Amino acid sequence: MADAKVIPFDDDRSRSGETSRPARRRTGAGGHGSGRGDGSAAAVSALPGAQVPGQPSEAGEAEHEDEGLRQDVEGSDGSSGGGWERRIAGGLAFLRRRVTGDYDVDEFGYDEELTDQVLMSVLRPLADKYFRVEVKGIENIPSDGGALIVANHSGTLPLDGLMLQVAVHDNHPAERHLRLLAADLVFHLPVVNELARKAGHTLACAEDAQRLLETGEIVGVMPEGFKGIGKPFGDRYKLQRFGRGGFVSTALRAGAPIVPCSIVGAEEIYPMIGNAKTLARLLGFPYFPITPTFPWLGPLGALPLPTKWTIQFGEPIPTDGYPPEAAEDPMLMFNLTDQVREQIQHTLYRLLVQRRSVFF
């Protein structure tokens, strides 16, 4: 398979592979393109509405183009049943590009075409039909420019991050893509490593996060890490420590707003009632969950419970008004970190009070 082309973030070229149509060449009065030496073609073409014999008029060309476009939309037989044909043709063209390597990825390995056409299509039914994700406050995510979404982390397996990606893309008017910062373990797992990079995930380090923000990307981070996703069921919806506030420093350096995000519903998909620590150490995992269904029911026990989710984005906290040296101020980072954490925690409590049922 040919290597995929790598493009920088600031490349404004279209990913569709189309090229602009060359300008239509016209023959002016007295030109040599008519093939006539007596100048009659020029004289005739100078008359209003006249047409040189043997040459198509601009109106005729436009009608021809419109007819071609209409056939593409309606199908070659003139009916409106060409939808399946277009889908099949689009699918074959997609497969050809994948096989030949004729697609673009950025320097982090993000494949926008694969994410839109395959990964999102797989995750969307899970978000819309299974978890029935309700999204609130999407207007708090800017339409352009960089922003850092900070969310709580839970659920034993990181499905909350994937559902957050779908929520941002499918509900934002600009269909923005969320670039998640992931732990080292994600990039050490076979298959998962490649899929994560294709979906736009990158290593959770300050340098990569800052580069993404400065190029106008929406970046997502879950500062609780494994402490949040692997906490016991009895500690559900109680935020763990947010680390040293590195995400605040990154946002300050990039001048990007911080958008707190609260996710309700993920805590109950795999109620973690135990942790096989010895087995976790042998496998190199931070924890090995024991739930009411796993490992007792085998692969069937790995199915998440169909809880009802709510994802709410809070009001953004601006950072562009601080001086450059603010990113080195530990007290400021502590205060902003605590502000973000408290806002997420209070929103979680409010959503839990409003929730009538875990599943409905």
Image (cartoon, rainbow, N blue to C red):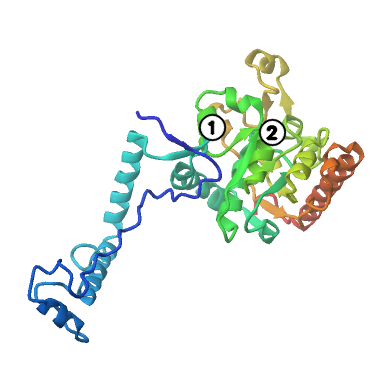
- Mark earlier in primary sequence (2, 1): 2
For label 2, the SS is helix
Tell me where residue 291 appears, x and y as whole percent. 67, 30
Q: Which residue is mark 1?
A: 300
Residue type beneath disc 2: Glu
Q: Nearer the viewer, residue 112 or 27?
A: 27
Q: CA distance from mark 2 to mark 1?
A: 40 Å
Measured along the vertical axis of the image, is residue 22 above or below residue 253?
below
Point 55% across, 45% down: residue: 10
Measured along the vertical axis of the image, is residue 41 above or below residue 19?
below
Q: Are marks 2 and 1 in contact (CB under 8 Å)?
A: no
Measured along the vertical axis of the image, is residue 81 above or below residue 224?
below
Point 61% across, 42% down: residue: 179
* Label placed on residue 207: 2
Image quadrant in which you'd find residue 2:
top left
Tell me where residue 44 appears, x and y as whole percent. 14, 82
